Amino acid sequence: MKSNYDFIIIGGGICGASVAYELSESGTVLILERENQLAYHTTGRSAAISMESYGNAIIRQLTVWSTRFFKDCPHEFSITPLWSPRGALILADSENEANLDRRIKAIEKLVPSVSKVNEQQILQLAPYLRPDQWAAGLLEPDAFDLDVHAIHSAYIRGIKRRGSDIIRNCSLTEARRQNGAWNLSLSNGERVGCGVIVNAAGAWADEVAQICDVESSGIRPLRRTVLLIHPNVEVPHTPYVGSVDEQIFIKPEATGFMVSPCDETPSVPCDSAPEEIDIAITMDRFLKMTNFTRCDIRSKWAGLRTFVPDRTPLLGSDPDMPGFVWFAAVGGYGIQAGPAMAKLCAASALGEDLPHEICGSQFSASDVSSRRNRAVPFTHASLNTVAELC
């Protein structure tokens, strides 16, 4: 490890790895990871699907750009495919069909491949679903699976190839900015300096900000439960299925169905684990909407998705602290929109304008700045993503 770097990245998940990769072209980079294993927390627990129809308008714009990166990534980044075809089907009962229609209207210009399908078409696409439950669905045929391990590994290989450093089992304990540079104390007893800190610490991002004497941004970690369920029959390769009111998602896997009740339980930053009540809710919803009568739970886990009230990530330089860049509150979009978000954060860390090729006329630096969320309370109402799609 050197005594001084141009950029120090706090966090070695997909956010930290991707922005480190971008910045390593322009200077020396160090990643600090508090765990022994990189991508141990949220990154390693992702549902691993990319849907251009998912999220608010800014997220959709970032996802569309990132889709091109995944499908046409440079040979030097990865020689193996990072994605595979899947498709996605978002369902609505009669009470929620109007919400589905609003979602389709909000996304159809940016994602022209989406279409509305009826119950008969739904059952053809996902024949394991029970009939007489769904009024309509949104079909996104070009949604695709992401190989999270391959993507993260490609970033890490690129970082190492460019001479950057990674320290595991090490966290930031103190940070002081003096004379235009940062002096950092680490949990391993060492001290190191840098010009720019990039805060990619996931659920711990506000804690990192406080260590750096930066005002917190009201980031809230929310626990999400996931089960791998096997129905004791052959699992079909069918589209990802979700409900427009976010009560469940079902993603077929080679060894079963990945299922979540889409829970969002506030949590402190931690190594999250599923609660028994959430496991029971997941199984109940899965059995009520499918034809399966007997299923085994093969595995279960939980992860923390981090949000601020408007559910748009914090990307870019802190307005009140020079040399401090946010890459935080990415919610459930850190993989599918990661390449675009990393480009934005890298540009900000380098003092450059946000790339127009990514933002276009859809948003500006102020729309993703940490300033917008300060002093804005995080309420239960802010958990409603359906109303925030436009």
Image (cartoon, helix red, strand yellow):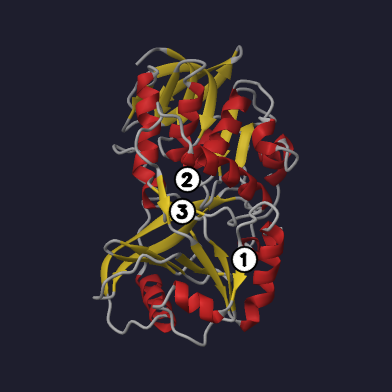
Q: CA distance from mark 3 to mark 1?
A: 16 Å
Tell me the quadrant of the picture where the N terminus can be found: top left
Residue in view at x 52 percent, y 76 percent: 121
Crowding near pointer 3: few (<14 within 10 Å), some, many (20+)? many
Secondary structure of the residue carrying numbered label 1: strand
For residue 110, side relative to residue 297 (left or right)? right
Earlier in the chain: of badge 2 and badge 1, it is 1
Disc 1 residue type? Answer: Ser
Q: Which residue is mark 2?
A: 335
Q: Is residue 135 above or below residue 177?
A: below
Residue in view at x 70 percent, y 67 percent: 102
Residue in view at x 47 percent, y 33 percent: 18
Q: Residue furthest right?
A: 361
Crowding near pointer 1: few (<14 within 10 Å), some, many (20+)? some
Q: Which residue is mark 3?
A: 144
Residue in view at x 59 percent, y 77 percent: 136
Disc 3 residue type? Answer: Phe
For residue 80, side relative to residue 103 (left or right)? left
Tell me the quadrant of the picture where the C terminus can be found: bottom right
Earlier in the chain: of badge 3 and badge 1, it is 1
Where residue 265 appears, x then y in whole percent?
49, 63
Residue closest to the eye, 308 or 64 = 64
Residue closest to the eye, 213 or 195 = 195
Where residue 304 appears, x then y in whole percent?
45, 53
Q: Which residue is mark 1?
A: 115
Earlier in the chain: of badge 2 and badge 3, it is 3
Disc 2 residue type? Answer: Ile
Quadrant in the rendering for residue 139: bottom right
Quadrant in the rendering for residue 3: top left
